Image (cartoon, rainbow, N blue to C red):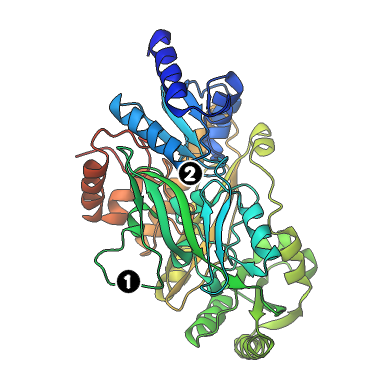
Amino acid sequence: MPESSSTRHREALGAALGGDRNTVRWDDNALTEHSRDTWCISILRSLRGMLSARLLCVVSPTAVDQVCATVEYANQYRLPIVPFGAGSGVCGGVLPPGDAIVIDLRRMNHILELNGTALLVRVQAGMMGNAFEAKLNEAGYSMGHFPQSIDLSTVGGWVSTRAAGQYSTRYGSIEDILLALEVVLPDGRLLRTKVGPRAATGPDLRQLFLGAEGTLGVVTEATMRIFPRPESGVGQSYSFASMDAGLEAIRLITRAGWKPPVVRLYDGVETARLFTAASTGNNCLLLLLCEGPEALTAAESQACQAICSAHGGEVMGPDPVQHWVVERNQVPGFEPFLKSGLVLDTIEVATTWDHIHDLYREVIAALQTVEGIVVASGHSSHSYAQGTNIYFSFAAHPGDPERAEATYFACWQKAMEATLRCGGTISHHHGIGRLRLPWMARELGEGLTVLRSIKKVLDPNGIMNPGVLIPEGS
């Protein structure tokens, strides 16, 4: 776009939105800050100076009418819109094309209503997760949603990527917690869904925007379930001789109806790396954390211990659980590893109990065939009566820096193919972005045609976060 056109659009947006000098920005710092998320490849390309697309501007609204006006303007002039939370996504969901308008929602960051009687909270989408949880705690409540990125992500980001938190086995993932939302549609209209415990009024419109990754609209507000803060908590850990044994114990715990908020099983590699004091060199460590009313936590922890003991679990005490609680969000960024020549990532997939053992073994084996692989490991972190997820980690050293991206994508290719072969879903909670696009047709089947049809109706001009979630094609 010629600079004269860019200037005209920026000035027109500034006039339409009003606000202060931070409402519409196009200085280099603003454009650079909003040019990517924290996907490994985005960071690698940024380090190499390969992210060259120059945004039109960054809009930082303080009210929903400014979001509506921005989207309406963009739709009129066919300008790409990229909703932006805090940029913590890891799948390339935020890589704005040139001349895009990025809508940074972080100034819309307030709790609008907290209803202790109905146990719900209405919150703006730009509120950071840690600030949101802290405010709820002050009032005696919790959302029960603790993604590892809670210090780095926003409420709107959770909705847009179908996030799952570390305590999801008891409290549910974001789709279980979300009661209603407000979203700006691609033509600038505002949609609000109704708040209630349940409704039988046709298809659930919330589901259109849960996980849509900004391709169908801009989420500006969410109404969530909240929970009274638990009165007690009991943590315990167990050592198993194998992942098979530990996974079977988890299956039986969830089958019986017990729902400890935290159920995490680490394979031998991750146990040795993360829980040195509890490692024998090849054992697998299961962490269980029960919380709630004292009578519930006592009964649940005793029942879980009986199941674990009956399947070869050796009690290792509460210390590993406490260690995890303290350290759980202390994860190093990609940049130091990339500078040292490594490529690395996590791949979270899921499947049913009858396929989980094969999935774990086959993904690990597939990753180990990649040239330059240094480590491939996994742990289960979110479990259900029907199945569980495995959160795989890999690191590889391609040798030649020019092969870094090829090695990285080879790891993903191997893992995705093995996952699909074992009947798994290609994403449990990080979403699709650009990273998982090549496997969406096999994941969704005819559902991809339906998704494309919805996109075409709601966003006929294709302005909403182009290149994300929905593969190109008719």
Spatial separation of the CA atoms under disc 2 and disc 1: 33 Å
Local packing at callout 2 (Cα closer than 10 Å; few below 14, some 14-19, many 20+) is: many
Foreground: disc 2 or disc 1? 1
What residue is pinned by disc 1?
199
Can residue 56 be seen in the rendering of this structure?
A: no
Query: Residue 189: which quarter of the image?
Result: top left
Nearest to the observer: residue 10 or residue 379: 10
Q: Is residue 274 left or right of residue 241?
A: right
Nearest to the observer: residue 41 or residue 37: 37
Query: Residue 167: which quarter of the image?
Result: bottom right
Looking at numbered disc 2 in the image, what kind of residue is underneath it? Cys
Q: Is disc 2 placed on a helix, strand or loop?
A: loop
Q: Quadrant of the C terminus?
A: top left
Looking at numbered disc 1 in the image, what kind of residue is underneath it? Ala
- Please tell me the numbered disc located at residue 91: 2
Q: Residue at x 41, y 48 (%)?
A: 432
Local packing at callout 1 (Cα closer than 10 Å; few below 14, some 14-19, many 20+) is: few
